[in-house]
Amino acid sequence: MSQPILYPYQRRYLADSARFKAGMWSRQTGKTFTTTLEAVLDVLEAEAEGRASRWTILSVSRDRALDAMDNGVKLHLRAIGAAFEAMDVPFAADELAHMVRIGSRGSYIRAVASKPSTARGMSDNLILDEFAHHQDNRAIWTALLPVVSRPDLKLRVISTPNGRGDKFYEIMTSPDGLFSRHVVTIYDAVADGLPRNIEELRRAMADPIAWAQEFECQFVDEATAWLPYELIDACEDAACPGEYQGGPVYVGMDFAARGDLTVIAVLEQVGDVLWLRELLELRAKSFAVQLAELDRVMRKYRVIRAALDQTGLGEMPVQEAQRRHGAYRVEGVLFSPARKLDMATALKERMEDRRLRLPVGNAALRADLHSVQRVAGPNGAPRLVAERTEAGHADRFWALALAASAAAGERLAYGYEAVARRRWAGGLDVGADDLPRDKWEGY
């Protein structure tokens, strides 16, 4: 008995003509094959009706884009017997699109590696292939949604899961009903006739977490995430940030000169719990502006201790901050592997003990906290790494870690009352260490 060209789950997907459609399918069940077939059939139908249809496939890499064309689009066109012209064409300044032109009406299907920049400037039907694995898929989503704003254009999002908290997770779990969603686990596919030996695959995978994600379509946290989403979820509180209560405050500041974010995290201690009162994000700002924001924080809050990233470009601003606010209150931190692990551990322990409160629904913060991965170093010692994206380089994570470590080291902190500001007899508002005591006047 010959195998069917399409299995029932594939036919059900093709029969769904919803404008917004998402497919979360197990690995190796034909999701790219099926979705590219939908694009081919749509183009051929449009040509037969005397109109044009255009599709763009955004793939996770150039190799995946080429595979979608060779083993998807071109394969279908040859099987159907449709004429087409294949070519590679410039797509953006540094990108190449693999394209086939079909018919005489200007119809085409093209595939390109996705970036937020490449998602702009199009007006095509879109396929987001393995979208959960696209780097910075939230930024890509923001860039591409206007592309399909025309009511006649379609959007297809297909992927296996890749943990919770990214845009694909939101698409597949949101209650808004925007997307028509199709979920196909390996069990569903085999029940519909796909010839696979499930137990053999499970034994070969030999990893329950990977099996649950890749074949059972479950949203699970990566085992290497320093802060799993479950832990982040447990620390979110709708009452955060709330109003400053006048308690002791600990500050962390991660400096950047270009590219990455400068982030200031402000944690107020209420009882034994730290509340995130402010998370300031500055991009491409001068050190003068960055230090002015730190000055504002030091004036507004009762800052017991501030830990500032002194690595590399942070040397100068840390020295200036110490000159302005005192070396006992401002600590410069050099980001050695051991010190990074200490800071990250201070943050994680706070979260595990539920002694940290974070705002609900801050997607950028959640992604940053989850982006730091624990890997084995050359000597077997744990090392913390994070992928650099357009959103930054875990800058929010490290600002929070600096603040948490400042709170953990409070026994070394300089007492706040000892540096209370006084008005000098000469009329200037100065720090307590700046002038002789016989010149002070109390407020």
Image (tube, grey):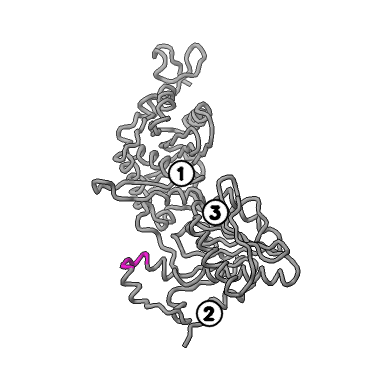
Whichever of callouts 2 and 3 sits on the residue coming sooner in the sequence is 2
Residue drawn at x 42%, y 37% as measured from the top left: 252
Quadrant of res 146:
bottom right
Q: Secondary structure at mark 1?
A: strand
Determine contact: label 1, label 2, CB under 8 Å: no
Q: x%, y% of residue 120?
A: 63, 50
Q: Which residue is mark 1?
A: 276
Disc sitting over residue 182 in the figure: none
Q: Which residue is mark 2?
A: 5
Disc sitting over residue 114 in the figure: 3
Q: Secondary structure at mark 2?
A: loop
Q: Nearer the viewer, mark 2 or mark 3?
A: 2
Between residues 353 and 168, which one lies in front from this camera angle? 168
Cα distance, mark 3 to mark 1?
A: 35 Å
Between residues 441 and 60, which one lies in front from this camera angle? 60
Asked if residue 208 lies in the magenta stretch, the reply is yes
Q: Secondary structure at mark 3?
A: loop
Residue type at mark 1 is Leu
User: How many numbered circles are shown?
Assistant: 3
Q: x%, y% of residue 248?
A: 41, 36
Residue type at mark 2 is Ile
Cα distance, mark 1 to mark 2?
A: 56 Å
Residue drawn at x 51%, y 67% as measured from the top left: 71
Magenta stretch: dominant secondary structure: helix
Residue type at mark 3 is Ser
Cα distance, mark 2 to mark 3?
A: 30 Å
Residue stretch in magenta: 205-210
Residue 261: in sight, yes or no? Answer: yes
